[in-house]
Image (tube, rainbow, N blue to C red):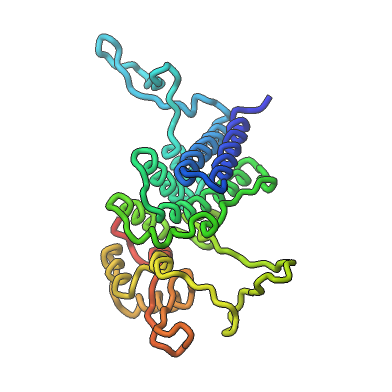
Amino acid sequence: MKSRAKELVEKAVGAMVSAIEIYNKPDFKYREETFAILAINSWELLVKAQWLQRNNNKVRSLYVREKCTKKDGTPYIRPRIKMTASGNPFTHSLDYLSKKLVEVGDLSDTALKNLDALREIRDSSVHFYNSNNLFALQLQEVGSATVKNFVTASRNWFDVDLSKFNFYLMPLAFLHSDHTAAGLILNKEERKVAEYIRNLDAANDPQGQYSVTVNVDVKFSRSKATDALSVQLSRESDAMKVQLTEQQFKDRYPLTYAELTAECRARYSDFKENSTYHDIRKPLKADPKYCRIRRLDPDNPKSTGKAWYSRSIFTVLDQHYTKNY
C-alpha cells in the first residue's frame, strides 16, 4: 500500500504534466492562466508530500488548528482543527508549508521566491484578468523556472526520475510572435506585477539548484534538409548575429549607471558611491548576466558605448552591503 506522501507525489507529477501539456498546445486561449493554476496546485501537492514525509506520514500534521471557545464562552484547553464548510479539515497552504521547508533546509529561498512570483501571476489571473502579452513573457520565464525547480525538488526529496516526461515549456517565439509589440503598454496593475517579479528575480543565484526565473534560448541544430539555413553560435565577427529587440533589451537590462547607483542608495543602509563600490561593480560589467554595453554602432567595437545593468547585479551587491529591508 502506498504512503500518503507517495500518493501526493504522483498527483503532483500528474498536475505538472497537465500544466505543461496545456501550455504547449498549438492553440489554447487561456494558456498562461491555466498553467499558473495547475503548476501552483502541483507544487502544493509536492510540498505537502514532503511535509508528510518529514512527519512520519501523519496527515494531522497538515491540519490547521485554531483557538476556539465553548458555548459558555470559555476557551478550549487545546486549539481545535479548523473545518471547512463541508466539515473537512483545513490543510496548511502552500505559502505556509514552503516557508517551513525553507526554515528546515529542505527548500531554498530562491525556489520560494519563484513560487511567490508564480502565485502572484496566478492570483492576478484568477481574481481579475491579464490583458497584455507581456504577461505571457513573464509566465514563460517564471514558469520555466517553476518546472526546473519541480524536477529538482522531486529528485532531491523522493528520488523521482522525470526524464520520461517532456518537462519543458515551448519557447515563446513559437507561441506569441507579437508579444514584444504588445508589451509596450501596461496598465497600473500589470506594472505592479512586473515590478514585483523583477524584484524577486534579483535573488537569482546562477550557481544554485533552484531559480526564480529562467531565460529560454532558441538553439540551432544541423538539419538534413538540403535547403536549410546554416548557422552556428560563435564569437567570431563574421558569425550570424542574433540580437535582442529593443523591448527585450530594456526588460533584461533596465538600469543605467545612475539608476543602479540611486537604487543602491535606497536599498542599502551603508552604501557609498566610492572606490569600494566601483571595485565591486566594474568586474561585473564583463559578465552578460549583469551588464551589457550598448554601442551606437553595434558593428564597431570602438564605437561609443553605454553600460546597462540587469537587476541580477543585486545578488552580488547584497553580499557586500546591508539591506534596508
Q: Nearer the viewer, residue 162 or 140?
A: 140
Q: Nearer the viewer, residue 40 or 283?
A: 40
Residue 194 percent across, percent down from the top left: 36, 55
Q: Nearer the viewer, residue 244 or 60?
A: 244
Using the image, determine if residue 29 lies above or below residue 68: below
Residue 145 percent across, percent down from the top left: 52, 53
Image quadrant occupied by the C terminus: bottom left
Using the image, determine if residue 41 lies above or below residue 278: above
**Residue 75 occupies quadrant:** top left
Q: Residue furthest bottom?
A: 302
Q: Residue at x 66, y 43 (%)?
A: 159
Relative to 308, 165 lies left or right? right
Q: Residue at x 61, y 30 (%)?
A: 7
Q: Residue at x 34, y 70 (%)?
A: 255
Residue 212 percent across, percent down from the top left: 47, 54
| Count of marks, rendered view | 0
Using the image, determine if residue 55 lies above or below residue 99: above
Relative to 204, 184 lies left or right? left
Residue 161 percent across, percent down from the top left: 68, 45
Q: Residue at x 58, y 80 (%)?
A: 235
Q: Nearer the viewer, residue 145 or 77?
A: 145
Image quadrant occupied by the N terminus: top right
Q: Residue furthest top?
A: 72
Relative to 171, 304 lies left or right? left
Determine if residue 62 is in view: yes
Using the image, determine if residue 290 lies above or below residue 207: below
